[in-house]
Amino acid sequence: MTGDLTGVSKFDNNIDMTRKTREIAWITAARKDFGKFPVPAQRIAARALTVAAEGGKADIAKPLKGFGSGVFEVVLPYRTDAYRVIYAVQIGEALWVVHAFQKKSSTGIKTSQQDIELVRERIKRLKEHNQ
């Protein structure tokens, strides 16, 4: 045998192999808009979504006000821009990404009313579809 271990990995006893990770499902328009983010911003947001899918909450995620429990906003400052990813954890079995956008507001940190209404409508449709 040669010493080539390419493709061989050791079992790490510190990894919980039984951890249940929820599927991350996307509203089509949200996935398309997310694809327009700079790749490094996509990676950061994807890590936050993975944490949520594993049952946690990333430091850059916060509850989205006005939606009760279960709807979160990933707040992502990247370079001189700001990006947001809205996801819901209480619709069916999956974690649903319902909206992704570059924040354009020049006043304050609030998410625009137009984006809030879009999220509200998408969540309503998802709940109706998943009943």
Image: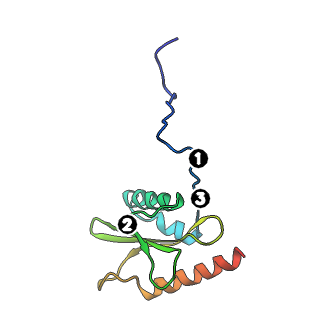
Q: Amino acid at mark 1?
A: Thr
Q: Position of residue 92 (x, y in %)?
A: 66, 69
Name the residue at 51% across, 82% down.
Answer: 67
Q: Amino acid at mark 3?
A: Arg
Callouts 2 and 1 close, C-beta under 8 Å:
no
Q: Amino acid at mark 2?
A: Ile
Give the residue number, with chain letter if any, for mark 2. Answer: 60
Circle 3 Cα neighbour tier, 10 Å, few/some/many (<14 / 14–19 / ≥20) = some
The one nearer the camera, 17 or 51, is 17
Q: Position of residue 115 (x, y in %)?
A: 47, 82
Name the residue at 55% across, 83% down.
Answer: 120
* Marks 2 and 1, how far apart at CA: 26 Å
Query: Which quadrant is home to the C terminus?
Result: bottom right
Q: Secondary structure at mark 2?
A: loop
Against 1, is 121 above or below?
below
Nearest-to-viewer mark from 3 and 1: 1
Residue 106 appears left or right of 13: left
Q: Earlier in the sequence, mark 2 or mark 1?
A: 1
Which quadrant holds residue 95?
bottom right
Residue 22: numbered disc: 3
Name the residue at 35% across, 79% down.
Answer: 104
Residue 6 appears left or right of 39: right
Against 78, is 69 above or below?
below
Circle 1 Cα neighbour tier, 10 Å, few/some/many (<14 / 14–19 / ≥20) = few
Callouts 3 and 2 close, C-beta under 8 Å:
no
